[in-house]
Amino acid sequence: MENTQETTKKTSRKPNEAFMKALTPSAELAAVIGNNPVARTEAVKQIWDYIKSNNLQNPKNKRNILADAKLSKVFGKDEVTMFELTGLLGKHLN
């Protein structure tokens, strides 16, 4: 019987180029993360930094994000779940 650790080769994953492509944020999103073109993954990271620095997570359910004046323009509502976040940001990146 062969040792599976010896037969398995570890390969480095290459990120999908679509995720790494720099996209221009909309005016609403630029008010939060800046006007520089960013990759979608970087935009999500910057939004989370903004959320945490402004204490915008719902204290009773940390999965929910309470929108302030800037984020409500991006989200289109006052509260979203963290699962909705990427989809809503995608509408503001082109």
Image: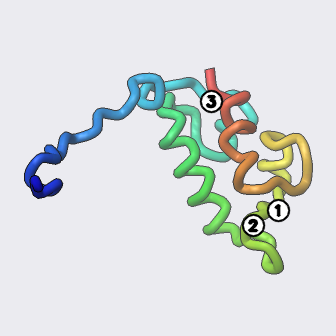
Residue drawn at x 29%, y 33% as measured from the top left? 14
Where is the C terminus found, in terms of image quarters?
Answer: top right
Q: Label 2 belongs to which residue?
A: 56
Q: Is residue 11 left or right of residue 13?
A: left
Q: Label 3 belongs to which residue?
A: 25
| Mark 3 closeness class: few <14, some 14–19, many ≥20 residues within 10 Å | many
Residue drawn at x 41%, y 30% as measured from the top left? 20
Q: CA distance from mark 1 to mark 3?
A: 21 Å
Contact check, label 2 and label 3, Cβ < 8 Å: no
Q: Position of residue 82 (x, y in %)?
A: 71, 55
Element carrying mark 2: loop
Q: CA distance from mark 1 to mark 2?
A: 5 Å
Height in image: 3 above or below 60?
A: above
Height in image: 28 above or below 66?
A: above
Exactly how many numbered labels are in the figure? 3
Q: Is residue 39 left or right of residue 56?
A: left
Where is the N terminus found, in terms of image quarters?
Answer: bottom left
Element carrying mark 3: loop
Element carrying mark 1: strand
N-term-proximal mark, 1 vs 2: 2
Q: Amino acid at mark 1?
A: Leu
